[in-house]
Image (tube, rainbow, N blue to C red):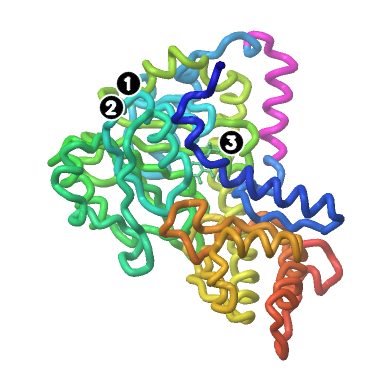
């Protein structure tokens, strides 16, 4: 009998797929589903980017051919220029930038290109799933580093046993963080990371997917702003969130030739890179920075403020995030014993509200839910009204969002 390999068999169903299934079941029961489970931007890609794609595909048939696997020179130059403009980071566009078919692809392939079976990778818990499952699929061994309010969501490197550190090949970091929305306050932690990575020869994979979605004047940095980072790190960026291009599948990895080279080589045997017309649309997106990104961040900030206020009013405990498109909230006391998965199942089936259970991002996420800010203000209002009923809260008023009060969709 032909059977799938054990490493695949052992994987649990992908958490978002499981929640999606529950949301579909709720919709089949005629519940009006408010799906805030995935970080899947609800707003369209800005029009000029769409137009660039249509023009390119329609009028430039050379872009229908195989792309250059590591990205076309124009794309890599646009990325290098952007990294310089945004972070003052200098990159050689030819050797230090690689186009990705979304950063998820790049991170999974990084694991496959750097790990041999049994190698250890240091992975925050909770984390964005590919940081963990990329390692598992490469037959590496994840060593989990809890992140929580107590340690300010920073992996405690001093707690990693010496013999684990010696066998570790990769260390994942992601700030602004998914799912916790935590950010780095200053560079001191990254300096410690660089010392640690140099001591044990560990490659740091710095996932910067949310660098442009930040609030209240907070500005996320690049790993490469820190001295010594280029000797030990690679950084990953994504167009998905910054430009509402999640479905286009485009991102990049960057870093020194020496560290990026193995990923470029590995990928050249697996894929042909992101389609040329998508890369050219990406160039247009980068040209439109910072205006589109600022406008989008303002939208998420307004949503964050409204939903945060509403949840706190209902008695939820959470921190007001300085970045990302997520709220990371403790499950209200009365429901905590259910655990986050059961809580989310109950919430979907009774109210149509789909959230991501914290445990789906790792055991340390138990007791929390992640709420994605991916719907209109008026739908958040609906959500709060439903939550109020679900929780049996009385005696408080849910404030309608401004535009909804004026009778418009927000
Ligand atoms: C931390 C983090 N990294 C990477 C990704 C994947 O982004 P992409 O769409 O570029 O594959 C996501 C998507 O949610 C994410 O949250």
Relative height, residue 185 to residue 316 (above, below): above
Q: Which residue is pictured at 71% across the width and 56% down the height? A: 375
Is 137 in front, or is 106?
A: 137
Q: Which residue lies under the disc numbered 3?
A: 285
Question: In what element is the residue under mark 1?
Answer: helix
Specify whether residue 88 is in view.
no
Quadrant the C terminus occupies: bottom right
Q: Are marks 2 and 1 in contact (CB under 8 Å)?
A: yes
Residue range (magenta): 46-62
Give how far apart the Cα atoms at labels 2 and 1 are: 7 Å
Numbered circle sitting on residue 262: 1
Locate residue 208, reporting x and y percent: 43, 44
Q: Which residue is pictured at 61% across the width and 64% down the height? A: 343
Numbered circle sitting on residue 27: none
Is 260 in front, or is 113?
A: 113
SS majority, magenta: helix
Quadrant the N terminus occupies: top right
Locate residue 348, reporting x and y percent: 71, 60
Is 326 in front, or is 92?
A: 326
Q: Which residue lies under the disc numbered 2?
A: 259
| Sequence-earlier tag: 1 or 3 | 1
Locate residue 260, reporting x and y percent: 33, 25
Give how far apart the Cα atoms at labels 1 and 3 are: 28 Å
Asked if the magenta segment contains residue 60, the reply would be: yes
């Amino acid at each position: 009998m032909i059977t799938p390999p054990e490493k695949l068999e052992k994987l649990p169903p992908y958490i978002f797929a499981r929640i999606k299934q529950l949301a579909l079941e709720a919709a089949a029961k005629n519940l009006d589903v408010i799906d805030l489970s995935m970080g899947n931007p609800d707003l369209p890609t800005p029009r000029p980017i769409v137009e660039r794609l249509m023009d390119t595909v329609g009028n430039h048939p050379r872009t229908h051919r195989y792309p250059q696997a590591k990205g076309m020179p124009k794309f890599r130059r646009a990325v290098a220029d952007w990294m310089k403009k945004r972070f003052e980071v200098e990159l050689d566009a030819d050797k230090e930038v690689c186009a990705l078919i979304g950063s998820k692809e790049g991170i999974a392939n990084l694991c496959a290109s750097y790990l041999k079976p049994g190698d250890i990778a240091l992975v925050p818990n909770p984390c964005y799933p590919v940081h963990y499952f990329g390692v598992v699929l490469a037959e590496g061994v994840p060593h989990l580093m809890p992140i929580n309010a107590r340690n300010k969501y920073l992996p405690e490197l001093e707690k990693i046993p010496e013999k684990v550190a010696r066998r570790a090949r990769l260390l994942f970091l992601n700030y602004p963080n998914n799912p916790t929305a935590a950010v780095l306050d200053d560079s001191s932690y990254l300096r410690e990371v660089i010392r640690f990575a140099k001591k044990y020869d560990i490659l740091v994979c710095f996932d910067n997917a949310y660098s442009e979605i930040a609030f209240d004047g907070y500005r996320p940095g690049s790993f490469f702003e820190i001295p010594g980072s280029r000797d030990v790190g690679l950084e990953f960026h994504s167009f998905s969130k910054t430009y509402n291009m999640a479905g286009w599948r485009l991102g990049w990895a960057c870093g020194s030739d020496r560290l990026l080279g193995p990923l470029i080589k590995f990928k050249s045997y697996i894929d042909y890179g992101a389609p040329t017309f998508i890369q050219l649309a990406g160039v247009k997106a980068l040209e439109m920075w910072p205006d589109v990104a600022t406008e989008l961040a303002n939208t998420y900030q307004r949503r964050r403020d409204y939903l945060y206020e509403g949840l706190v009013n209902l008695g939820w405990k959470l921190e007001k995030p300085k970045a990302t498109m997520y709220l990371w909230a403790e499950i209200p006391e009365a429901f905590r014993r259910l655990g986050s998965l059961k809580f989310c199942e109950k919430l979907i089936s009774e109210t149509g509200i789909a959230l991501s259970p914290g445990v789906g991002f790792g055991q340390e996420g138990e007791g929390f839910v992640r709420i994605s800010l991916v719907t209109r203000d008026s739908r958040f209002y609906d959500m709060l009204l439903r939550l109020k009923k679900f929780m049996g809260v009385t005696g408080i008023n849910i404030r309608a969002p401004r535009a909804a009060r004026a009778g418009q969709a927000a």
